[in-house]
Image: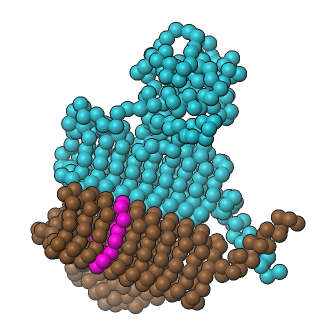
Amino acid sequence: MLLSLIAKALELQFEGSDIEITSMNDLGLASSTQLSFIADKKHLSLLQTTQAAAVLVPNSLVGEVPPKTQLLVVDGDVQLAMAKASKLFYKPDFINVPQEAVIGKNCTIAETAFVDSGAVIGDNVTLMPGVFVGTNAKVGDNTILFPNVTVYRECVIGKACIIHAGSAIGSDGYGYAHTALGEHVKIYQNGNVVLEDNVEVGSNTSIDRAVFNTTLIKTGSKLDNVVHIAHNCEIGEHSLITASVIFAGSTKVGRNFVAAGQAGIEGHITIAPFTTVAAKAGVTKDVKEPNTTIGGFPHMPQRQWLKLQAKLARLLKA
Amino acid sequence: MYSLQEIAKTVGLDFEGEDITISAMNTLKEASSSELSFVSNSKYVADICDTKAAAVILDARLAENLPSGTIALITDEPYLVMAKMSKLFAPAIEEPSLGAPQIGESSVISPKANIENGAIIGNNCHIMAGAYVGTNCVIGDNVTLYPNVSVYRDCKIGKDCMIHAGSVIGSDGFGFATTKLGTHVKIYQNGNAVLEDDVEIGSNTTIDRAVFGTTLIKTGVRIDNLVQVGHNCVVGEYSVMVAQSGSAGSTTLGRNVVLGGQAAIAGHLNIAPFSTFAARSGITKSIVEPKKVWGGFPLMEQKQWLKLQVKIARLLKK
């Protein structure tokens, strides 16, 4: 979409030279054909070094935009302008791309399963009744999708994966901009979800699609039932995530991460490889040292949490 | 519609007064002059003298408080009797004899979606594969139901709503009367669930139908994945419920209430508008003062909770 048209749709002044914008992205990841934005001053250094073709900026930061990047100056809330722009790049689910789905050899596809146009299904795949595979989604060889699994458009499921009944892969991330009146304006989630090979997902688990780019579950990871993985998370290789664990957005965990039941993980944090999180723990900050076991809310080393419980028990007797 | 005589006979009860026709069951407060009600919770004894109900199931000791003309059905197990009677008013699961569903202009309904007879679907809707819309449901314009969404019979969904894969609107509320032997008798959930306009619901979330009346999600509410809304709740305008948060039955949230991830509210409470609850809050009492920020379990102001965590950390050093 032409930058001048984006400006027009957002009712913004545009004076630069017109270019074709392919999509939107974060400041740090945007390429020279993408539109980005700065809604928070803490991202100033990313703005100064961004490769984005154009950015939505508030008046106060105009001087910080690199010379090769075009400006759309927002008089008001940049987050709101970004939410409105995201709608311009949204691909509806009923686009019905012209090419038919490609189905590999020896697949078992139930009559009530549905594979949308442009999807690619590998060899020896089993799609049980009620399964939905969206437009341009990919399902690798030897993967089994149990009844009523939904794989949204453009998501990628690797080889030899197992997804249990009712799970949703690629539903919209929970992202909104807020008006002064307290209404919530949708930020269209135009990224996808990728499950690498040998990933297993339990029943009724939800993995949200990224706002831009990808929510990624790496090779060999196993997720239990009713787990929630928010948009833009990255789960390291061979991780184990048990029932009712919840991840807020954009958190990255290293390989062989283990989370026991009902643990909750804060958004935008990084967790070192081989970290184990005890049941019901609430992880609120980065975990930098690998190979530790943590528990409690806010989290602490699990040994310390056990000591604390002993002290609290003693308090009761005092 | 049953005569009170027939209804009473099913549980072996008798009553004094003329036989009348009963249209439905309802709470003491909401019951009309053709409805049957009950008292089992001492909280609601005060409502007895003002009820408009045609007949009330109650303990002998409370009968004298009934307004004159209201028929008393006397039992020492009113809750159990109510449960048994609720079955009589349960509608059929499907009603094939009703007219074919009405579908608005430009709506796209997947051939693999199921729309029951008697349902009405507005204009420009997208109903994807595996979605189910029950008998007599009413769906507004511009609504998207992603794959495998279930909307149970008699529920209503307003304009511009979006419901992600696997979510369930109108499943039975969790209501049982327990016998003296410890077995649980189903209280048939004969109400419905209503979503007003511009409501977005994530994947694998559940909104239970009311036992009587309506579970109500008001305009502009945003609900994330794996959220639970119990029967007869009212969620105020523009409220936000993050993943795995939930509310037990009959709780009313004011507008712009924010529930963080895994936060939980007990039943039968009132929550003041603009209240914010941090992730994992456990809310056990009504919140009267609006605009405050809460956290912890038991609940306290979030500032206090943060202070408490510092003190607890100091305990460890002793």
Query: Magenta span has B304?
Result: no
Q: State the residue at coordinates (48%, 84%).
A: A256
Residue pictured at 57% horizontal, 32% vertical: B80
A170 vs A201, nearest the viewer:
A201
What quarter of the picture does the N terminus of chain B occupy?
top left
Could you say where residue A124 lies in the image, as x and y percent from the top left?
21, 74
In cyan, which chain?
A: B
- Using residue B226 as the reference point, say whether residue B146 is left or right of it: left
Q: Is residue A295 above or below residue B272?
A: below
Location of the C terminus of chain B (image quadrant)? bottom right
Q: Would residue A30 be found to the left or right of residue A259 on screen? A: left
Magenta span has A168? yes
**Hey, which residue is sitting farthest front in the picture?**
B181
On the image, the x and y values in percent for residue A175 come to 42, 66
Chain whose colour in the figure is brown: A
Q: Position of residue A35 (x, y in %)?
A: 31, 78
Q: Quadrant of residue B311?
A: bottom right
Q: Residue furthest right?
A: A318
Which stretch did the figure color magenta?
Answer: A154-172
Tell me which corner region of the image, top left, top right, bottom left or bottom right, holds residue A81.
bottom left
Residue at (43%, 82%) from the top-left corner?
A: A238
* Horizontal side, residue B64 vs residue B55: left or right: right
Instruction: Establish if B21 lies above or below A298.
Output: above
